[in-house]
Image: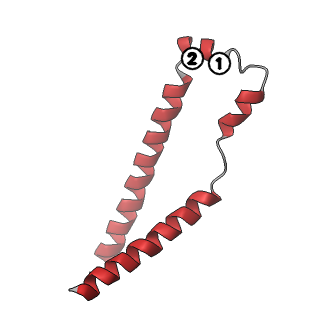
Amino acid sequence: MEYLQNFFSWIWGNLRTLLVFVINLLPDSPFSVLDNSAVAGYIGYLNWIIPIESMVAILQVWTVAIASFYVLQAILRWVKAIE
């Protein structure tokens, strides 16, 4: 039983290391440029009319959901092809 626990902790450690590596490859936020621009003072007022922050958050969640669906669908098709 201890072998199984060591095996899963080894997998989790390597998976965590891989995820940290991939996250470090991602660029910084593209919206940080807005903080230094001429429109930085008006973004708050614009958010009252057009909720840009909410739209970006919803778009991010939607994109992750769709991408996860397609990845899971491809994995399930691959597994079915093996059987």
Write the residue at 58% across / 65% down: 21
- Image height of 12 relative to 58, above or below: below
Residue 45 vs 13, above or below: the answer is above
Residue displayed at 33% across by 83% down:
7
Quadrant assignment for the C terminus: bottom left
Amino acid tagged 1: Ile
Circle 1 sits in a helix, a strand or a loop, which is it?
Answer: helix
Q: Which quadrant of the view contains residue 37?
A: top right
Q: CA distance from mark 1 to mark 2?
A: 6 Å
Give above or below for 10 relative to 68. Answer: below
Front in this rendered view, residue 75 or 20: 20
Residue topped by disc 2: 47
Task: Check disc 1 and report the residue beneath it.
Answer: 43
| CB atoms of marks 1 and 2 within 8 Å | yes
Residue 38 seen in this snapshot: yes
Q: Farthest front residue? A: 2
> Dot 1, crowdedness within 10 Å: few (<14), some or many (≥20)?
some
> How is the model colour-coded?
secondary structure
Q: Residue at x 32, y 67 (%)?
A: 76
Query: Residue 20's spot in the image, x, y percent?
Result: 54, 63
Given residues 42 and 51, the one toward you in this image is 42
Q: Secondary structure at mark 2?
A: helix
In the rendered image, the quadrant that contains the N terminus is bottom left
Q: Position of residue 44 (x, y in %)?
A: 61, 16
> Which quarter of the figure has residue 46?
top right
- Within-10-Å neighbours for mark 2: few <14, some 14–19, many 20+: few
| Rendered image: mark on residue 31 | none
